Structures are given as structure tokens and as C-alpha cells.
Amino acid sequence: MWLFFLLVPILLSSAQKNDIDDVTSWVITGRKTDPNVKQPANNDNRLVLTPTKTSTLSCTTTDGKDGRCVKPVYCVKEPEEKDPTTLFTYREKSCHFLLQCCPLNQVLEKAKKTRTLPTECGWSNPGGYSLRSSEPNSGFSDFADFPWMVALLKQSPNQAWSEDDYIGGGTLIHPSVVLTVAHKVDTKDPAELKCRAGEWDTQTEMEILPHQERNVQKIILHEDFFQLRAHFDAALLILESPFLLKDAYHIGVACLGRDLPSPGTLCYSMGWGRSFNNTNNAVLLKKIQLPLVDPAVCQRQLRNTRLGSNYLLHHTLMCAGGETGVDTCVGDGGASLVCPLKVKGEMTRYAVYGMVAYGVGCGVKDVPGVYAKVPFMVEWVNQKMSDEGLSRTYVF
């Protein structure tokens, strides 16, 4: 009898995994292939994804109709916004929260088209999908809120996300170039690194569109980078091949800000680093709303910490935050700090003004976080891009 009770959880776990594996809307060359689906040419080792059948996992819609669990792009009916506090899973057969219970007569065999997408830099959520309610200070982004966000990872044969492989954040400023902080990569060999764009939930591949990965070919550090104090904390990662942006609205390039907005401007940062209320890294991409802080005020506040009365805020650094329980944290280094440019319909356009550099604790009142000042780096970035024979970045 004791053997029965030991085996039941294992069998239930296996059944649940099979349900998840059944939800396969994409065939991924190199990981899972279907002999009945013709695979596109893939001569440059990029990840190639081909639409195939939708899920066969059954469900019941909120109005009591028989349905099938599918990605929202495979359903005529528009998905309902989801309250993140309800994203628990009952211990019964139901849809993963990234999937939609679609009435059987509304399931599509081919993904529906997204709306016309802007081609300019810096637009948030250009595909117009909302997977969950996302209040400004909920702490988490929605899918494609920050299409320029890149995860820096150690190269590994394992395609699954690993805490051990995660290094930090970066910003896509060109299909072949990622901007990040120098202190994340100054001791690294390019052959050790890869960049992942289009990621959101690190523990699943059920997002509407798949992420892409590219290996790093070259690291360009700012010549004046001073590691001890994080002065001139900027680096460019030149990729072996560009990210594919066509039909991938969840991956896009960022705008770089030339003139820093005034103190008090509400901006956003992001990352998969540690949530300061626990020791674990975030699973969903964070979305942290932060006010810009006047440099003189920031320097005075940081002198009240363990940094001491001699602390000087360098002119290549800036500050944001200083509110209780709202902050970037360990592991977010290199992620962008973006401020709004303008709004068009449901979309907001942003420019990057900072990159997460360092802090004293996380989420402490009157202790702002310190960010590399991107406006100061714009000309350096464009000169290095020109040296590499690449087009200049988008600057506002």
C-alpha cells in the first residue's frame, strides 16, 4: 500500500507534464521535429519555428462551452484580461495561464494576423496583446511590454532557462547589437556569451511567440570604464547574426535618449533579477516604476548610507527610485531604464536613459538606485557602431 501512495504523485506529475507537452503550437528545429512538417532551410544555426497543429487539450469556457486550450493567436475570440492574483492552478485538467480556452467553433488552424505594427524604435507591446492585468506597480510586465529587453546568458547546450546561466540584462539597439553595462562582461570571453530576445516567462515556452537566441561575436568595452566605481559603465555586444524582427513584434530595437528628463519623471526598469522580498530570481519579466532623482539629492541620500560622506556621484551616472519596496535588485544589472516619449492608442513609446548599475540594498526609502547614464554614452555608441560598419542608433 505504501508503494501506491509513493507512485501516485509521480503518475500525476507525469500526466500533467504530458498535458503541457501536448500544447505544441510550434515545431522547433533542433529540439522537437515533426516528420510530417517540412522544415525551412536553416544554414546559419538560427532557431527556426514553423506553425503546426493547435492543442488537443480540452477545457470548458467561462460560459460553459466545450473548448480547446490554444495560444490566443489561434482563437477568433479575443482573450480576456486576467487578474494576476487569480493565476493559480487548480489541481485538475485546465489551461496553462498563457493559453486561452477557446470555443471549439472558434479555434483557428492558422494563427490570426496581428494589427499593423510600427517600424520605429521604442514602442511597447506593439502586438496589442494583454495576457494579464498589469497595474503600474504590480511588479511584473505583460508580454512584449519591452521588446528591446535582452537576457545575457552563458552559452550552454541546454536550451531551457537556468539560474546558473543567467548573467544580467541588456538592450537591443540594432538587430546585431546589444547595449549593456561593462561590469557584466568585462571579464568574459565572447565565446562564453549568448543573448536571448523575446523572453518573458522563463519557465515556459507557451508565450504567443517564441524567443530567439544569438551568440556573441565581439565585446566592446568603453575605453574609460573604471570597474571599481562603475564610471563609464557601458559595453556593446556584437552578435554573430542578427535577430529576426519581421513577424516578431515581441522583439524590437530601443530608442536612446539624448537629453535626460527632469527629476520626478516616472520611468520604468525591468529584469529577471532577484525580487527583494525573497532570494529567488523573478520568473516573469519585472516592470518597476521609478521616479528620476536629482543628482544632488541622490548624492546626499547615498552619503547617508554605508557609502559614506565622501561618496561622489560621477557624471556618467544617474539615479532613480528611493521608494519603499519598489526597486531593481541583484541580477538586474544591465537592464534598461526607460522613460515615456509619447502615447499612440494603447501603445507607449519609450527611450532608454539609463542602465541598472548598482545600489545599496533594494527597495529602501530614500536610497535611490544608480544607473549608467545613457545620454552621456550616445556619441560613443554611434562611433563604435560606425567603426563596425553598422547603421547608427535611434536617438531622441
Image: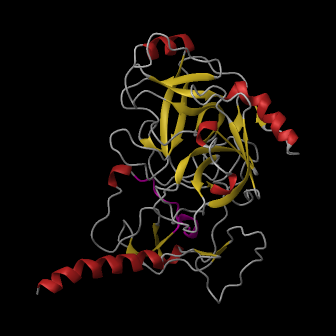
Nearer to the camera, 277 or 23: 277
Residue at 58% x, 65% y: name it: 73
In terms of depth relative to the viewer, which is nearer, 100 or 374? 374
Task: Answer above or below: position of 112 versus 10.
Answer: above
Is 77 in the magenta? yes
Magenta residues, as a range?
Answer: 71-82
When asked about the image quadrant of residue 255, the answer is: top right
Residue that appears at 78% across and 37% down: 394
- The main secondary structure of the magenta stretch is loop
Q: Is residue 290 visible?
A: yes
Based on the picture, tell me whether residue 366 belongs to the magenta stretch: no
Q: Whole-percent x and y of residue 38?
A: 71, 84
Image position, residue 98 (x, y; %): 46, 62
Tell me, yes or no, if residue 181 can be seen here: no
Q: Position of residue 314 (x, y in %)?
A: 61, 18
- Classify the position of the N terminus by image quarter: bottom left
Left/right placement of residue 211 relative to residue 307 reads right
Task: For the C terminus, give its image quadrant.
Answer: top right
Is residue 79 shown above or below 334?
Answer: below
